[in-house]
Image (tube, helix red, strand yellow):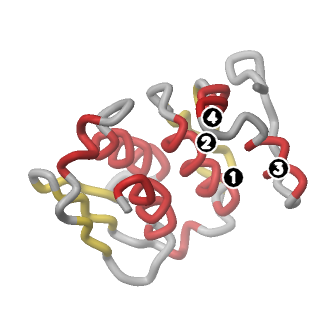
Amino acid sequence: MQDAIPTLAVLAAFNNSPVRFTGISNLRVKECDRIYAINEGLNRINPGLSSVDGDALLIHGNPGLIGQTHPCQINSFSDHRIAMSFALAGLQVGGIQILDPECVAKTFPEYWTELEKLGAKINFSTTVRRP
């Protein structure tokens, strides 16, 4: 289930309790260092939301973020799973801009279209292009 960790970690950011992901060292050698990317992205949304302990990732859940606006840019590192995972954060927190969103084409070219069909409002600026 290693490929599910980015999504689970982003969702854990809105949990009432901390969540610790262990045994995930192989996430460092995917399309990017996903442990770094998740930690960096969550801390852009809200400093202290995530921390790294060796190859473990600790998410300090904060359900109070839901409905707030925290303008930030999330670096997808051209990793489809990072882009798709942080899109879910954007459903809960306003102001999230995902850089290089077209990288989702690797596994799910219609991801943004399908997310819009589910009711998500997606805005693409000149720095964030629609795939």
First in sequence, mark 3 or 2: give its number. Answer: 2
Q: Which type of secondary structure does the marked residue at label 2 adopt?
A: strand
Which percent across, then down, holds residue 57? 24, 58
As drawn, 64 above or below 58: below
Instruction: Please say if the residues under marks 3 and 1 sit with CB atoms less than 8 Å apart.
Output: no
Q: Quadrant of residue 68?
A: bottom right
Mark 4 Cα-neighbour bin, 10 Å: few <14, some 14–19, many ≥20: many
Q: Earlier in the sequence, mark 4 or mark 2?
A: 2
Q: Residue at x 43, y 83 (%)?
A: 16
Tag 1 residue: 94
What residue type is disc 4 on? Val
Mark 4–mark 1 Cα distance, whole angstroms, equals 21 Å
Name the residue: 63% across, 34% down: 104
Give the CA separation, mark 2 to mark 1: 7 Å
Which residue in the protein does label 3 denote? 114
Foreground pick, 113 / 90: 113
Would residue 33 appear left or right of 112 to someone viewing this image?
A: left
Which residue type does callout 1 highlight?
Gly
Task: Residue at the far left: name it.
Answer: 54
Tags 2 and 1 touching, CB below 8 Å: yes
Q: Amino acid at mark 3?
A: Glu
In this view, the mark in front (4 or 2): 4
Q: Nearer the viewer, mark 4 or mark 1?
A: 4
Find residue 122 and report its horizontal and vertical position in percent: 81, 42
In the picture of the structure, the residue carrying the numbered disc 4 is 104
Which amino acid type is marked by label 2? Answer: Pro
* Eye-nearest disc, 3 or 2: 3
State if disc 2 and disc 4 touch (CB < 8 Å): no
